[in-house]
Image (cartoon, rainbow, N blue to C red):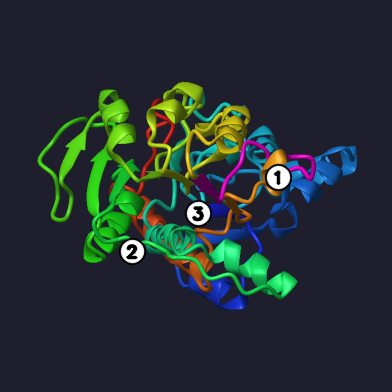
Amino acid sequence: MPLRVAIVARLAEEDWALLRQVPGVELVDLSDWAWADAAARQEGDPCVRQELARRLEDVAVALLMGPGQPLLAHAPALRWVQLPFVGLEQLAGTPVRERGILVTNARGLNARSVAEWGLTLMLALAKQLPHYLRQQASQRWEPRQAPTLSGMTVGLVGLGAIGGELARFASALGLRVIAIRRSGPQPPPAGVSWVGGPGDLPRLLAEADWVVLAVPATAETHRLIGAEQLHQMKPTAWLVNLARGALVDEAALVTALREGWIAGAALDVFEQEPLPAASPLWQLENVIITPHVAGTSPGYFHQVVALFCENLRRYLAGEPLLNRCDLERGY
């Protein structure tokens, strides 16, 4: 009997072709449930719920690019979920842990893209690109001096796949790289001056010209950066958030940006997304805002499908899965 695999994703035909090459599986197309708005509309219809339950009967595995609640509510045989990103937000409020469901993510697939975005934001801020874009819009000519990154210190909060890539880029440009990670102090990798544990965050904040957040959103990292931490940063330092909006107390950050506790910020993620039009962050000239795009690149979902296919092969062969998540830690 083939393994029934639900594809809760909108995929290109080439990705479907890749999935069809995996022997021993029966694919269940649930692409119409791939986005939260579609799922929410359909969940209110009893007939749709019955149809969903029928289609999910005996489904053991799912590639989930949509909300997790409907899937888990109607798939009693589900044993493993593959997520397309690193975060576990899709599964919030679902009983994955209680039901013993395996969860794997796409850790590392977008590390280079996110690291490149982080470096892009740092260069844009250092070279005062927002200032010149405002000049261009108003046809003004006001040259300014801009520092080089070489000789500055970047403090990485997180030294996983993304932090490691950014450390490599930064050291190549002559920045001094320091970092903290959950696993604590250890010999630093090439290009990194020192690696500390969570308790070394105040030291990192005090030394860094650039504080870059690259850790998962967990109970331990919720509002990791608040008023106290922003006061510990240099008034000339910049905050770059490539991780999750929940890591930063946005109200405290707005105050810090307005009152000059820090020089500014580059933010790709926010407490609420899309960022509400009423957010004061939109009006601040010392902020760069991008709409959670650091990890997006052409062909990314093809990489996700390729990873999923390899994990399907491993699952059927009884081998360990790649990128298995620790649900206790939250990543």
Query: Amino acid type of disc 1?
Result: Leu
Instruction: Specify which label sits upstream in the sequence, 2 or 1.
Output: 2
Residue 20: percent from the left, percent from the top? 52, 71
Query: Amino acid type of disc 3?
Result: Met
Do we see residue 149 in this rendering? yes
Given this view, does label 2 or label 3 mark the residue nearer the observer? Answer: 2
Is residue 81 found inside the magenta-colored segment of the image? Answer: no
> Which residue is painted at 56% across and 51% down in the image?
268
Whether residue 62 sits left or right of residue 42 in the image: it is left
Residue under label 3: 1
Query: Amino acid type of disc 2?
Result: Thr
Residue 168: percent from the left, percent from the top? 25, 60
Q: Quadrant of residue 49?
A: top right
Q: Which mark is residue 146?
A: none
Residue under label 2: 148
> Crowding near pointer 1: few (<14 within 10 Å), some, many (20+)?
some
Whether residue 179 sits left or right of residue 65 in the image: it is left
Residue 170: percent from the left, percent from the top? 28, 59
- Above or below residue 145? Residue 179 is above
Which residue is more in the foreground, 55 or 11?
11
Residue under label 1: 275
Given this view, does label 1 or label 3 mark the residue nearer the observer? Answer: 1
Residue 233: percent from the left, percent from the top? 39, 33
Q: Element type at marker 1?
A: loop
Which residue is more in the foreground, 81 or 315?
81
Which residue is more in the foreground, 33 or 20?
33
Is residue 265 found inside the magenta-colored segment of the image? Answer: yes
Q: In the image, which residues are magenta?
A: 264-279
> Which residue is painted at 49% across and 39% down in the image?
79
